[in-house]
Image: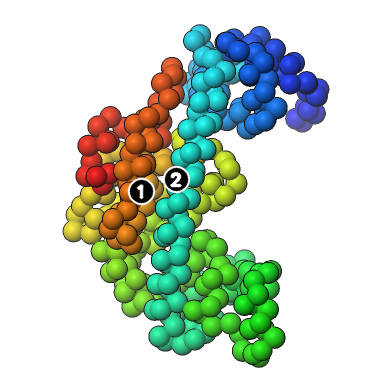
Amino acid sequence: MLPPYTKAHRSFADQLALLMQRGLAVTDAPKAIEHLQRIGYGRLTLYWQPLQRRVLDPNNPPKTLRIEQFEAGAEFRHAVDLYLFDKQLRLLFLDALERIEVALRVDLAHALGKRNAWAHRDPAHLDAQRANQPMQGSTRHSSWLTKADQSITRSKEDWVREFLATYSSPIPIWMAVEAWDFGTLSWLLEMAHPNDRAAIAKRYGLLPDTLVSWIRALAFVRNICAHHARLWNAGIVNQPKVPKQWEAAQVVHIGANFAQRSRVYGTAAAASHLIKRINPGTSWCRRMKEHWLAFPAMPFASAAQGGFLPSWEEESIWD
């Protein structure tokens, strides 16, 4: 049986004292307490974890376990620097994600709308094999449509209320897309008719499955950003597919090392390609490059933990 949780509430001063007791150096105690009050112990925990010691797992060597004690040379300010770096990283990603999401809405509305104003509601207008896959006692499309319709009913937009008060028909695809989030859009792209997926992917110079993979990876990153979670060294569950040389030559290098795809680097490279297709004059790629080149100097944490391996900045995707 697992033991109950017994740790007591601590004041901000006591929280800092505990960290110092565990070996975390603090050069400005009042400033550190201010950060604990403003950011919170729990959130900062994610950023001082790389600074904590690791020991061999006695039950499963050579794996290691992270312990509460800090490495010699670890400082409280290092965790704050990582937090601030990560915050700016999320803001940079949200800038790209907004442009990609808006473009995807247009792509789906235009492609599906040519088939039928309500093509998204009928698997006959989609990829029937994917749309009719069993899911939670129903089908993939039925589960998706329930979520998509909930987005409409929860919307507070004037145009939604005006449409529902004026027409008996469901909202057509070219309007409905404006109420859906990135995840809902990514599901629809994956279920879209093969010809429509191909037409949308062609805009970005990609194969359909490559684009679907990249959009799913970006949807995962968007969820991290939306919840203000740690991104800089997070594991990317939905990893971006390595493109063919003729699809996106500047992104092929993400296939050279698993760390580049399983961390944020690969998704950043995919976003860079898409952004360049949407807006060839974008400065986003340069800004992302400059941000990672300015990774805060500290022991025990580096850009490589985010998949930005040595010489990454020489890749042409960041030009």
Reply above or below: 43 against 62.
below
Q: Where the N terminus falls, by quadrant? A: top right
Which element carries disc 2, helix, strand or loop? helix
Q: Is residue 140 visible?
A: no
Residue 113, picture quadrant? bottom left
Q: Which residue is mark 2?
A: 92
Residue 28, picture quadrant? top right
Residue 190, picture quadrant? bottom left
Q: Is residue 271 visible?
A: yes
Q: Where the C terminus falls, by quadrant? A: top left
Q: Residues within 10 Å of mark 2 (few under 14, many from 20)?
A: some
Q: Residue at x 34, y 71 (%)?
A: 200
Q: Residue at x 50, y 26 (%)?
A: 81
What x and y, as percent, mark residue 4? 80, 28
Reply above or below: 158 against 31.
below
Mark 1 touches mark 2? (CB < 8 Å): yes
Q: Residue at x 49, y 36 (%)?
A: 86
What x and y, as percent, mark residue 243? 27, 55
